[in-house]
Image (tube, rainbow, N blue to C red):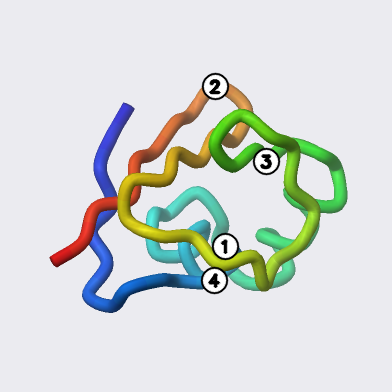
Amino acid sequence: MRDVHIRDEMIRLGQLLKLSGIAEDGTHAKDLLDAGDVAVNGEQEFRRGRQVHPGDHVTVGREEIRVTGA
């Protein structure tokens, strides 16, 4: 697991996937979500606009990230 730090109280899931380097761009993030490869806090997620907050865990395949904040 690795930490990804955000500056604000929340970030959209698609933006987080790009910030973390998991997705190359917005289209790639959408493809990962459409394929059912993304889970937030253990629940499968399909929405790019899902709000993610510090303390949340995002899993994409075998890669897991923890969102940290200020």
Mark found first going from the N terminus, 4 or 2: 4
Q: Amino acid at mark 4?
A: Arg
Q: CA distance from mark 4 to mark 1?
A: 4 Å
Local SS, label 1: helix
Decide: marks 1, 3 in contact (CB < 8 A)? yes
34 relative position to 26: left or right? right
Residue beneath the point at 24% across and 53% down: 68
Residue at point 46%, 62% (across, down): 16
Say whether marks 4 and 1 touch (CB < 8 Å): yes
- Numbered disc 4: secondary structure: strand
Q: Return the mark for residue 13.
A: 1
Q: Which mark is residue 12?
A: 4
Front disc: 3 or 2: 3
Mark 1 vs 3, N-terminal side: 1
From the viewer's perspective, is 28 left or right of 21?
A: right
Residue at numbered disc 2: 62
Kindly check if marks 3 and 2 are in contact, taking CB atoms under 8 A apart as contact.
no
Assess disc 4: are there few (<14), some (14-19) or many (≥20) residues with their C-alpha within 10 Å of its C-alpha: some
Marks 1 and 3, how far apart in space? 10 Å
Foreground: disc 1 or disc 2: 1
User: Mark 4 and mark 2: span between their CA atoms?
Assistant: 21 Å
The quarter in which the C terminus is drawn is bottom left
Asked which quadrant contains residue 44, the reply is top right
> Is 38 in front, or is 32?
38
> x, y (%) of residue 58?
51, 41
* Residue 38 position (above or below residue 19): above
User: How crowded is the residue under tag 2: few (<14 C-alpha within 10 Å), some, or many (20+)?
Assistant: few
Residue at point 49%, 60% (across, down): 52
Question: What residue is shown with label 3?
Answer: 38
Q: Amino acid at mark 1?
A: Leu
Dots 3 and 4: beta carbons under 8 Å?
no
Three-letter code for the amino acid on which mark 2 is drawn: Arg
